[in-house]
Image: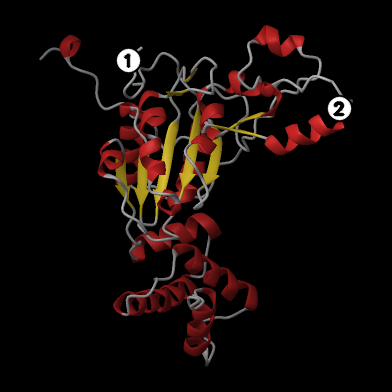
Amino acid sequence: MTAATTPPGYQPLFDPGAATQPFDPDRAYRLGDRSTAAALPYVYDADITLAVNVALAAGRPLLVRGHPGTGKSSLARSVAERLAWRFYPVTVSSRTSARDLQWSFDTVARLADAQALPPGSALPPHARYVVPGALWWAFDPASAARRGLDPADAAGDPGFAPAQDPTPVNPGAGRSVVLIDEIDKADPDVPNDLLVPLGSYQFQVEDGPPVTAAHPPLVIITTNEERELPRAFLRRCVILALAAPDAERLREIAAAHFGALDPQLLDAVQVVYLRIRAERIDAKEPPPSVAEFLDTLASCRGLGLAPADANWKDLATLLLAKVTAIPPEQP
């Protein structure tokens, strides 16, 4: 095969080794089912990097599975910072609906304004109280700022106040990352209700025109596996399972967060951490997370606790047990 006919090599859309990668409109991005600041310390491996690239190339959500503290949520913001994209985090609760991620209506504010009007006055326009959700900002930030109004209608309403883009990262960027955190805490209907907006990258706001993504966001969804997710939802996601880090990865994570560390301190804390993690797993209790490993290292440094201390083993065990203490369940 000649050089002229050799197909191009693997060209990742996401390279965690690069500081920032601004959106390139000339690259091809699939739109799912529809045809028409400084980087955070995060240690990537080949599986994580490939999963992010597959989600970007396929135009599918990335579902990240794993125990609490394995780095699921922090992955989303790290990707947004390294891509120089906007970032919209949403933490799901049992009261979260799929529509909340798209838009909501501030009935309290409208009622308060209506009560302040003189008798016989017309109610304020409905659109003033439409609140764009994370997916709306990610799909079409200009439309979200206008709360779905046409530009002329928004300009012609003297009392209209544009919605403020809530992104904490890279405002004005061409694309975005959306974090839907802990989706397993939501009502079982929520994942199924998200199939259309996450598959077609569009949704409807009441009787207005559909909100459509010109460029698809990267939607990263996390689950602690507290509830089984619908199979139809799983089939539409790229799935990344984050396992508990081994000793080598723990060292890489510690170095990313703390820089140079006393190797004896790192080794000693790691031994205690891995022992407690194994004991918790054997007892079918929640294992300590990576965040708690980092907290223990920070505490040892701050308190001057060193492996050379005579009571190191007892103190380190007590410290890690305090950091990782799980309160008993309420009856």
Q: Residue at x 36, y 33 (%)?
A: 195
Looking at the image, do the residues carrying marks 1 and 2 touch, with CB atoms under 8 Å apart?
no
Is residue 182 shown left or right of residue 164? left
Tag 2 secondary structure: loop
Residue placed furthest toward the top = 152
Is residue 200 shown left or right of residue 125? left
Residue placed furthest toward the front = 120
Residue 113, given in percent of the width and then of the height, sits at 80, 31
Mark toward the start of the polypeptide (1 vs 2): 1
Q: Residue at x 31, y 23 (%)?
A: 33
Q: Amino acid at mark 2?
A: Leu
Q: Residue at x 50, y 35 (%)?
A: 99
Tag 1 secondary structure: loop
Which disc number belongs to residue 180? none
In the picture shown, does residue 223 fall above or below 293? above
Residue 130, given in percent of the width and then of the height, sits at 64, 28
- Say which of 11 and 209 sits in front: 209
Within 10 angstroms of label 1, few (less than 14), some, or many (20 or more) residues? few
- Say which of 27 and 168 sits in front: 168
Between the residue at mark 1 and the residue at mark 2, the CA separation in whole angstroms equals 47 Å
Q: Amino acid at mark 1?
A: Ser
Q: Give the quarter of the figure containing the N terminus.
A: top left
Quadrant of the image occupied by residue 145: top right
Which disc number belongs to residue 117? 2
In the picture shown, does residue 287 fall above or below 233? below
Instruction: Give the labeled residue for mark 1.
Output: 35
Is residue 74 shown left or right of residue 57? right
Residue 227, given in percent of the width and then of the height, sits at 35, 56
Residue placed furthest toward the left = 1
In the picture shown, does residue 166 fall above or below 323? above
User: Is residue 225 at all visible to an observer of this figure?
Assistant: yes
Q: How many marks?
A: 2
